Amino acid sequence: MLLRVIILIIIAGAIYRFFGGKIPFIDKKEEKETDVEKDFGKQIQGTSECAFCGIYMTEDDALIYHRKAYCSNDCVEKSKRLKR
């Protein structure tokens, strides 16, 4: 009887895995790898060069002023002063 229960559990686990289910303790390492891949994807973003000082920054961090990307408010203010 115990052997039948063990075999049934193994078959149920195999079917569960076949249809894409995850077993919490076994699949934990795979989840960490996908988290690393997600973080790596976040690091590879488009970059922009500051129109004033030339520093590169991500497009999310860039400040856009008159269709130019700046790294900080200081660079925006300095570029305004130079134009006057």
Image (tube, rainbow, N blue to C red):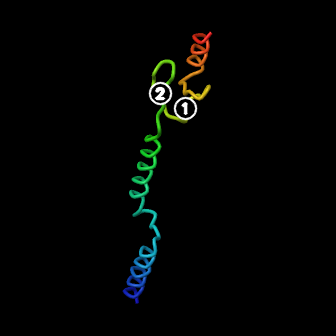
Disc 1: which residue:
61
Q: Nearer the viewer, residue 8 or 55?
A: 55
- Which percent across, then down, holds residue 25? 42, 62
Left or right for 65, reference 14: right
Of label 2 and label 1, which has the lower sequence position? 2
What is the secondary structure assignment of the residue under circle 1?
loop
Q: Which mark is residue 8?
A: none
Q: Residues within 10 Å of mark 2 (few under 14, many from 20)?
A: some
**66 w.r.t. 80: above or below:** below
Q: Nearer the viewer, residue 53 or 6?
A: 53
Left or right for 36, reference 76: left
Question: Which residue is pictured at 55% across the width and 30% down the height?
Answer: 62
Q: Amino acid at mark 1?
A: Asp
Disc 2: which residue:
49
Question: Which is more foreground, mark 2 or mark 1?
Answer: 2
Q: Amino acid at mark 2?
A: Glu
- Which percent across, then down, holds residue 48? 48, 31
Q: Quadrant of the C terminus?
A: top right
> What is the CA distance from the residue labelled 2 to the residue labelled 1?
11 Å
What is the secondary structure assignment of the residue under circle 2?
strand
Report the residue that reaches farthest toward the front: 83
